[in-house]
Image (tube, rainbow, N blue to C red):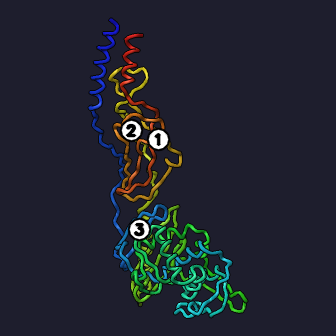
Amino acid sequence: MKIRRYIAAVSILTAVFLFTQTTCVHAQEEIPQIVDMVPVSKEPGQLYAMSAVLMDGDSGRVLYEKDGTKARANASTTKVLTCIVALESAPGDDYVQVSEKAASQPEVKLGLKKGEQYHLEDLLYSLMLKSHNDAAVAIAEHCGGSVEGFARMLDRKAEQIGCKDTHFITPNGLDAEDKNGTHHTTAEDLALIMRYAIRNKTFLHIAQTRDYNFSDITGKRNFSLHNANALLDMMDGVLAGKTGFTSQAGYCYVCAWEKDGRTFIVSLLGCGWPNHKTYKWSDTKELLKYGDDNYYYVTYWQEPQTNQILVEEGVEKGQDIGTRIYLRGKCTVTPEDKEKKILLKSGESVECRVEIPDTVQAPVRKGDKLGRIAYYLNGKMLSACPVYAEKSVEKVSFKWYTEKVFHDFFH
């Protein structure tokens, strides 16, 4: 009698098992979490620059742009990258030998002479404070072996920083052309370069120095430099800045400015030609005022609302036949994660997306990654926290059904 009951039960459970293999559950739609803010403020007025960018120095997000991705000549703003590559590739107390090529560079120049030697650090002050073209070439030849070799270093560094359309041929930014195109960058790329540069303490120290005195290695020639970045005297909080001008580039400028814990970067290309030298200061102040008036740090963490996840073909010890097995995802969040901030202006919102499935396939192991909780601004992800399975769930099998029947009928 028991054997007949056992055979009948196994037949029924076999049918149930086969049926569960073809059953599916529809996933639920995502429920975004939105932070609402007050109405949008107006943007900057008419700018003189052909290309301009205002960037958040912390996140690298472009807060305002005018033809920000248009490739243009950028003159001596190139020297920001020249300085940072030199700082990263050679010690400041290196002796730099001046070549004939370096000594023959056009104005603006320090007046280096062939065969002279200088400390690299001193030439970096010459490069950044007074934009000397001969110092730039001497630095390039020392660090890169040649101007061409150093140019390749510049382009590699630009790519590492995240620049998308930058090609540098000269270390001083003089107009040039080769088989790969003209010497150029974009306002957005230039802002990214400055954003990277201000993370270097030595670069900041050089850029903020008002006056600097040095001599050649022999001590026979002495030089006095005064910083040409006039914005240092116009505004408090200026971290760094670099001017530039060539006939093709027009007046250019890039700077970083800090106020109330916020860092703004402005880059301008084609900001007037001769007789309009002051346009760059007007545009810079306009953009910095716009950033200061409208952008403030907001903590964007939101407690996510997560649902239970159905484990298809999942089984647990002691469950009844046909019982659905669920689990929850676990997201480990640090206090620092909850304090993350982003610069936002009126009308902008941060969206929290719970990017985990409604169903997963057994087996599942405790700690398996199920998805993530992600935060987005204007479609771009700010940060994400992985979600892991809180427990293990085995996969149903014919063996499990057989053992279940045997246990229920014979115990």
**Residue at the (48%, 67%) spot, across then down:** 161
The kind of secondary structure element at disc 1 is: loop
- Mark pair 2, 1: CA separation: 10 Å
Q: Residue furthest top?
A: 1
**Residue at the (34%, 75%) spot, across then down:** 46
Amino acid type, label 1: Cys
Screen quadrant of the C terminus: top left
CA neighbours of label 2 inside 10 A, class few (<14), some (14 to 19), many (20+): some
Residue 331 - label: 1
Is residue 77 or residue 118 the one in the foreground? 118
Residue 255 - label: none
Q: Pick whichever of labels 3 and 2 is earlier in the sequence.
A: 3
Q: Pick whichever of labels 3 and 1 is earlier in the sequence.
A: 3
- Mark pair 3, 1: CA separation: 38 Å
Q: Position of residue 204 (x, y in %)?
A: 58, 72
Q: Pick whichever of labels 2 and 1 is earlier in the sequence.
A: 2
Residue ID for mark 2: 306
